Amino acid sequence: MERSEEYIKNERKQDWRVALQKKIKAKDRMSIERALMAETAPEVRIKSQRIEVNTGLTKEQALTEASRCMDCVNPTCMEGCPVSINIPKFIKYIESDDILKAASVLKETSALPAVCGRVCPQELQCEQKCFYVTKLNQPAVAIGFLERFAADFERESGHVSTPEMATENGIKVAVIGSGPSGLSFAGDMAKLGYDVTVFEALHEIGGVLKYGIPEFRLPNAVVDVEIESLRRMGVKFITNYIVGQTASIDDLKADGYKAFYVGSGAGLPRFMNIPGENVNGILSSNEYLTRVNLMGADSEESDTPVLRGKNVVVVGGGNTAMDSVRTAKRLGADRAMIVYRRSEAEMPARAEEVHHAKQEGIEFLTLTNPIEYIADEKGRVCQMKVQKMELGEPDASGRRRPVPVEGSEYILDCEVVVVAVGVSPNPLIPNSVEGLDVSKWGTIEVVKDKMQSSIPEMFAGGDIVRGGATVILAMGDGRKAAKNMDIYLTEKYLSN
Amino acid sequence: MNKIVEKEHFSEKIVKIVVEAPLIAKSRKPGNFVILRVGEKGERIPLTIAGANVERGTIDLVVQKMGVSSTKLCDLEVGEYITDLVGPLGKPTEIHNLGTILCCGGGVGNAPLLPIVEAYKKAGNKVITILAARNKNLIILEDEMRKHSDELIVMTDDGSYGKKGLITEGMEEVIKREKIDECVTIGPAIMMKFCSLLTKKYEIPTVASLNSIMVDGTGMCGACRVTVGGKTKFTCVDGPEFDAHQIDFDEMMSRLGGYKQEEVDKFDQFQK
């Protein structure tokens, strides 16, 4: 649960922490080099969708890396964490070789530490606020690597802990969507004593963690272990259930549900509306990744087909585009290409993903934009017309606006095109709930710090509110919503 | 959940199954569909709901053996379970009392058409139903349709039953005979295309229900996109019914074959 600043400061003064602080001189800590994450060789990993790229720190590496952490009086790293993990505490437990305790610290505030340790953009969050970066201009403590190490160690040890739970209060709450936001919310509410049921439209729990992020970045087995932890905490899961369609919110209320958390995600893929975009062989990254990640279409045993081609173009520059193009490589493409309208510097994808993609032989056609698709006589895409771009004045996003270069069009061969230019919020909940305030973009309007919608008993977070963000921000919303829904329900039902 | 409680062979390749799905039985409306999956390696496929029994908590599905997934579904026996079943999905049919409705079903399209015929009749319309197929054996749900229609016309390509001729010939006869206020067409894409061309000529508002390729059925994948009135729509959340005169049927038919080669390969593998 949330701890006050003072509590965190006092914890730092505990004997074991003080002893550790004195064990190594600051100068010596600072002279240690940041650990390097071991990786499966590119030529090996591109042969399968299911070989993880990063293989994790060894225990020795982790203990050494943990000793780089200065256990700062003012741990600014924590300000950078959307779910407020007690970063110095878990790292110091690693340093003192009590890895299981480190893992239990992670679980105090994060429902998915093994997931976050893999997919969070730490370089923009905790690690960006690390003392090494802000004061020493040196590489940050590898907080993400350490988080992953502790979570993996616990899972592999077989001693998976369950966090401290409040007494059950019997109040039923429903979670709509089992992605990172819903799971984070469910974990916190279960800890607070609520009777939590998560409703999922698909046949698998995990949302984007299962259908979106590929196994080479986040193995499904890792996600399943975290879901199992939530089950042990009493969270119930119902798959194949679309709230608003299978049953209405009113039906659920009649079933005794007192409040709802909507984490239904950014469902609708965007397209560019250019000529030929609906010919065969052109699909959204959602479709492409769902076929492979959720339905296992990379395997011959799966009944679900997936399109393969020698030349695969992925349009876009975000993490989803990287996931798609690297998947294409693994499905056997000779040329797997990114076509992105701005330059590499503006790419929203994590630097690590771009780096890994390049190692794997992905081609980057930056400052290039598709303007038309050309189909063969069977109606399947065979070429795309692209146009070169140059960067002009900054636009509303602060990034320099790409401007077409006249007369620069040329033709690119492609048998498969994956469009990864963003998503819009899923309309199912906004359309099926009367009285719910929705923005003109289709996102649910909430009171920002509370995540409460225009319907008092309905809270929302993640991409259905943000329109398209990261796993960790969605999780942060889930925590915020849990805290505020608890206040709301306590006032309404538990205070006499 | 999802236990098969009844199974009936309409023909060698067309099977009706009644499956336990109490929540869907209660909440489904005419026009809605479900997504289902057979086996842990199964594909997610959409099927329009052909009927429901709320007391019994069951829904009816009519399936035609085409490829791997439909064959696996047809091969399930009473007492077995459908691995996953979710719905109801899609926008329901807009049912109003408009006057005279011409309902045109082709092949297994009769199955999703049945609840629509039923609803139009119940709303006070005069319902004229035309069922068409290549031959007598492929005409399904005739008795049920007759029960809810003021008039039922059967057309077969080979004349083995009812009148000989294409569905459009039967339609034109009716249209010339009396005023039709709305037309609904469900069947093979090519049939819907020609139904639509005919009613456009006579300026009769027409609705077609599309059976696009889908993965999730909730708007997420975009596999089911279709051009309607020059704009891209998603069959799953914007449809499955659209103004037939606005649908780009040629594109739609091409998109139905989007995974043809892959599907054929899977089927060959399955038969081995």
Image (spheres, grey):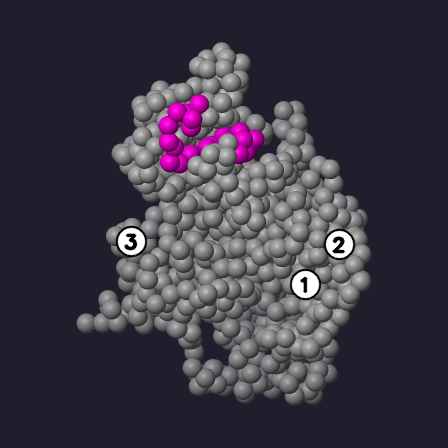
**Between A346 and A109, the one nearer to me in the picture:** A346
Amino acid residing under circle 3: Asp
Residue at mark 3: A250
**Percent of width and height locating residue A454:** 34, 67
Q: Residue at x 26, y 72 (%)?
A: A491
Residue A131 % position (x, y): 62, 84
Label 1 sits on residue: A317
Question: Where residue B232 sits in the image (x, y, percent)?
Answer: 56, 50
Question: Label 1, label 2: how many angstroms apart (C-alpha)?
Answer: 18 Å
Under mark 2, the amino acid is Lys
Q: Is residue B11 above or below residue B36?
A: above
Q: Please state the chain letter of the residue tagged with numbered disc 1 in the rendered image.
A: A
- The question of residue B242 being in magenta is answered with no
Q: Amino acid at mark 1?
A: Gly
Q: Chain of mark 2?
A: A
Q: Earlier in the sequence, mark 3 or mark 2?
A: 3
Secondary element under disc 2, as helix, strand or loop, is strand
Residue sitting at x 71%, y 64%: A341
Toward which corner of the image does residue A56 lie, by quadrant? bottom right
> Mark on residue A385?
2
Q: Quadrant of residue A57?
A: bottom right
Query: Which range of residues does the magenta coloring cover?
Result: B173-197
